[in-house]
Image (cartoon, rainbow, N blue to C red):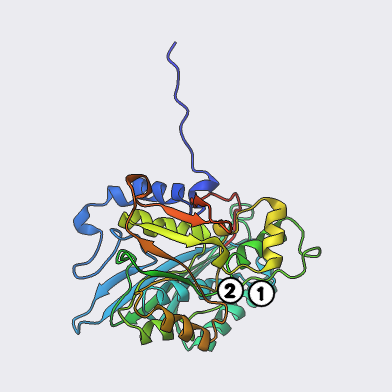
Amino acid sequence: MVARLTESKVSLTHGSGSSEAWRFIKELIVDRVPENLRRVEGGYGLEVMDDGAVLKLNDGSYLVVTTDSFTVNPLKFPGGDIGSLAVHGVINDLVVMGAKPIAFMDTLVVEEGFPESELREVVDSMINSLVSEGIALIGGDFKVMPRGSIDKLVITGVGIGVSRRPIVDVELKPGDKIIVTGYIAEHGATILAAQLGLLDKVTNLRSDTKPLTKTVFKVIETFEGRVHAARDPTRGGLAATLNEWASSTSLTIKVYRDKIPLREEVKAFLEALGVDPLSLASEGIAVLAVDPEVHEEVLKELRRVGEVNAEVIGEVITPPNKMLVGKVVGVTEVGGKVLIESKSINLPRIC
């Protein structure tokens, strides 16, 4: 009798933003596309697996394009809703690539029977977020799925931006300082509490979703060429971002855990649940790798323009041994050293 192999299936882990998710995407998509078709000549694409793609224009400037899908549950949460979240998420993907956002396109996929009044609220929130940033809504699509074939609502956004000098996260250098622009894990903790029905018991949680155009983008423009990498730590959180950077460059990143900005209310809530805040999503901060010669000025400017909780949390170093090539090392409050790994948090529909 011949044993039949069980076919592997897609799991929630594959969409978590963890190292397992990136491995899955690489094997499923990237490795199956011919190398000459992973980018347009003069730009960047699949080969860097960044937050967007870069196309070089005839005048020497660059067009940056990004896309993201949003499937948060609940659709409305303290600090925002799926409409504003979709706009902010797409905007921030452009910002951390050094691009000024100029246009947005949306696709709404709605379940049959979804209340029209609630859909109108979501669309109003999305449009208001774009208007406040002066970003054009230039097109989109609308689909309705049969009841039960989709859970309420999914929004996909496409963002278009322009840049003189895009930031691609393969330019990390030993000595670069790692800066986090604000408190981490705010969004992930809020959605986790909402999904567990704990918002009435933990009342100080609020998503940090916001656009970074008026703060982080201004600083990136001011210090053009001195920010070597930038990312908004959404799915997978800070741990995923740092591990992707270290792995893609074969360098080591050292961070000091006591320097990572984390509100006490968020810390206490996550400790009670045994959840690592470094693996939870943020929706209104950025992680920057900055030239050490200007990092103090960058930090000062971030705080001046409104990112008052920005902190230097670590640095990029040459791997001290083979075991630490492509790894993230955390220095604990008592001086011990531990590996910070990208963990999969079983938290579906978070962003």
Indicate left or right for 44 with 275 as reference: left
Is 160 on the left or on the right of 36, as rendered?
A: right
Which of the labelled discs sits on residue 209, or is there none? 2
Residue type marked 2: Thr
Contact (Cβ within 8 Å) of mark 1 with mark 2:
yes
Location of residue 35 in the rendering, given as x and y in whole percent from the top left corner: 21, 54
Query: Considering the numbered disc 2 on the image, is that residue within a helix, a strand or a loop?
Result: loop
> Which residue appears at 77% of the width and 69% of the height?
203
**Residue at left offset 34%, top offset 52%:** 320
The Cα atoms of the two marked residues, 1 and 2, are separated by 7 Å
Residue 145 % position (x, y): 57, 58
- Identify the image quadrant of the N terminus: top left
- Earlier-in-chain disc, 1 versus 2: 1
Q: Quadrant of residue 253?
A: bottom left
Relative to 173, does residue 326 appear above or below in the rendering? above
Q: Is residue 127 above or below residue 348?
A: below
Q: Residue furthest front?
A: 335
x and y percent of residue 139 in the render?
44, 77
Q: Residues within 10 Å of mark 1 (few under 14, many from 20)?
A: some
Q: Residues within 10 Å of mark 2 (few under 14, many from 20)?
A: many
Residue 74 visible somewhere in the drawing: no
Vertical relation: 31 (above or below) 265? above
- As drawn, is 65 to the left or to the right of 310? left
Residue located farthest toward the top when viewing the structure as drawn = 1
What residue is drawn where x is 59% and y is 71%? 183
Circle 1 residue: 79
For the residue labelled by badge 1, is the local secondary structure a helix, a strand or a loop? loop
